[in-house]
Amino acid sequence: MKVKNNHYGIPIQKYYFTKPQQAGWLDLLLPTAYMDCYTPEKPHLFSTEYRHTLLTDLTPDETSIFQNFPKDTRNQIRRCEQEQRFTLNLNTPLEHFIPLYNAFAQTRGLSLFTEADAINMGQENYRIFSIDHAGKPIICHFYLYSATSSCTNLLISASSQAYHHDTDMRRAMGFANRCLHWQGMRYFKQAGFHTYDWGGYVENTDDPMMQGINRFKRTFNGQQVPLYNYYSPSYAFIEMARKKLRELQTSLTRS
């Protein structure tokens, strides 16, 4: 899967679900990245970002997958289903996802998402699921997927900030978020996919927010595996600049 977009007139290309190949001169010249690779096969002259992720195996039967979750996780999923407080939506429109995510992103200092971003990914390469309340999504999961690799990747998970001070609602949304992951696994398993990639796991982080995300992801007992991003020289420079900018934004927000 190839995603192409332009930033300030510069063409940037990313490959997902693709085994790295010997890079041609154009890939070396342009900002090019092979994202979320499971094998350490670096293209010549590319740099490597070492990461980790959690994988859930979707090949066992549904009962076995569910029973592999810790007891608390199973209970919270059942609680959400029994309360019937929310509605599950497995075909969430892009125009409903974008405002929820962008409001979430602004609170975290993340890049905003546009319709152009979705167009560059290709409608056939992503799917959006949500938990809805009062006719609007309050939790969204944005997945990239590849039928050829039988893998789905959780690219974005975002929740509404409207209930930040409502303790009971936040508790119920936590249960619902677990339920949405479970229903996502069921959907992709039934569609013939074999692997549910949790979209990253940050090792040895001191960031309290990332520690919380890690704890949440671990409550599904996924297998931790190494992950590799491969960057051309110009993409590596852009990524370094982005990282410095995010660190500056975080520092300003905290101060």
Image: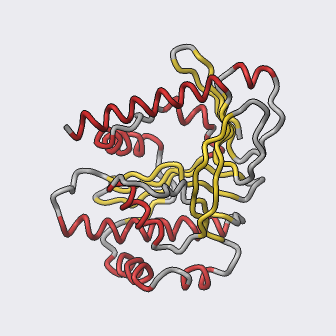
**Residue found 77% across the figure and 41% down from its top:** 20
Residue 7 coordinates in the image, percent (x, y): 53, 20
**Residue found 40% across the figure and 45% down from its top:** 96
| Residue 11 picture quarter | top right
**Camera-side residue of 195 and 23:** 23
Residue 94 vs 148, above or below: the answer is above
| Residue 99 picture quarter | top left
In the rendered picture of this protein, how many numbered marks are placed on residues? 0
193 left or right of 10 in image: right
What's the colour scheme?
secondary structure
Query: Which quadrant: the C terminus?
Result: top left
Residue 4 vs 135, above or below: the answer is above
| Residue 193 picture quarter | bottom right
**Residue found 59% across the figure and 85% down from its top:** 63
91 left or right of 121 in image: left
**Camera-side residue of 64 and 94:** 64
**Camera-side residue of 24 and 193:** 24
Residue 140 coordinates in the image, percent (x, y): 42, 54
State whether residue 201 appears in this view.
yes
Query: Which quadrant: the N terminus?
Result: top right
Residue 49 vs 138, above or below: the answer is above
State whether residue 137 appears in this view.
no
Residue 109 coordinates in the image, percent (x, y): 34, 38
249 left or right of 224 in image: left
In the picture as drawn, the residue positioned furthest to the top comes out as 9
**Camera-side residue of 180 and 64:** 64
Residue 241 vs 92, above or below: the answer is above
76 left or right of 124 in image: left
Residue 248 coordinates in the image, percent (x, y): 33, 31
**Residue found 35% across the figure and 45% down from its top:** 100
In the picture as drawn, the residue positioned furthest to the left comes out as 165
